[in-house]
Image (cartoon, rainbow, N blue to C red):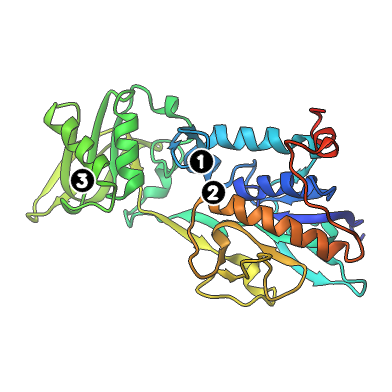
Amino acid sequence: MTQEAISTDVVIIGAGPCGLFAVFELGLLDMKCHLIDILDRSGGQCAELYPEKPIYDIPGLPVVSGQELTDRLMEQAAPFKPEFHYNEMVEELEKLPDGRWRVKTDGGLVFEAKVVVIAAGGGSFQPKKPPIPGIEAYEGKSVFYAVKRMETFRGKNILISGGGDSALDWTINLQPVAASMQLIHRRDGFRAAPDSVKKMHALVDEKKMQFHLGQITALHGANGQLEGVTVKGNDGNDFQIECDTLLPFFGLTMKLGPIANWGLNLHENLIPVDTEKFQTNVPGIFAIGDINTYPGKLKLILSGFHEAALMAQAAFRHANPDAKLTFQYTTSSTSLQKKLGVA
């Protein structure tokens, strides 16, 4: 039995911050949006990887967590009644004779839309796992690759492994709630913000945590519960660290997935776009946020918001070539304020 197609103006692939703000910008132009995301909720990397981690470079919000930013964007988009389809991955993209796009997911959903917006971040992302034998048995019980709720780690004896921003940030942020905090890295140099490194060393000096040089070679415990690890030190000797929780932060592997097969020009797994419309080489398909590339591109959320605003104007013109588009400000337009429910 063929799944009946869901008809809409726009299908947005990815429900991260850029996809959510695109709903708002398209909604102001009366364009109905359906969003598809491989995760089980909105927010993309903000919600999946650092929901409680502070973000400092969103205009007008001196500090905001990934989850709070997601919540605010959802609230902002709500007047336009977007429809979300979670735990779905877009597998097929096909152009119909009437110029619309047919979008099919791995879960059997079918959409037909005038415009497709790819806001998929870096694609589907997976943590890079350390090459430690048997680590899978501990995953989700005492080994975690992301911090979704800091409270989960209260009172734990935590060992964090890594030398990038995530490792240092979570060392600093979790130290106050942990029973004990230890950090291990293969060298004394870090790929993290200098201020974070300074704060970590200060905690060590104050004897609030420990820092070790070396690499974890084995895990010890039973039934998924970690009791300690074996470390090969930089001097070649092995030593033991007691801990009940391990957080390895070795970065992410981004997988573009089926997007690579959609006939779009790709450059190093990114989608080139113009900076007037943020359209791909295929008319009617746009790309915003971390998934796109152009001269001068900055991978910042605020850049993605700018891209969403210009994309929406171009998407409206593509979908409605004979309609007149008058630019309006939300501060002064009564019609826009009615759409937002504030008039």
Cβ atoms at labels 3 and 2 below 8 Å apart? no
Element type where label 2 sits in the image: helix
Element type where label 1 sits in the image: loop
- Which callout, 1 or 2, points at the residue further toward the start of the chain? 1
Residue under the point 74% across and 39% down: 330
Residue under the point 30% across and 36% down: 171
Q: Nearer the viewer, mark 3 or mark 2?
A: 2
Q: Residue 335, relative to residue 118: is it above or below?
A: above
Looking at numbered disc 2 in the image, what kind of residue is underneath it?
A: Leu
What residue did someone put label 2 on? 302
Cβ atoms at labels 1 and 2 below 8 Å apart? yes
Marks 3 and 2, how far apart at CA: 43 Å
What residue did someone put label 3 on? 230
What residue did someone put label 1 on? 58
Q: State the image quarter where residue 10 is shown.
A: bottom right
Marks 1 and 2, how far apart at CA: 6 Å
Cβ atoms at labels 1 and 3 below 8 Å apart? no
Residue under the point 77% across and 50% down: 26
Residue pushed farthest front?
Answer: 332
Q: Is residue 62 left or right of residue 205?
A: right
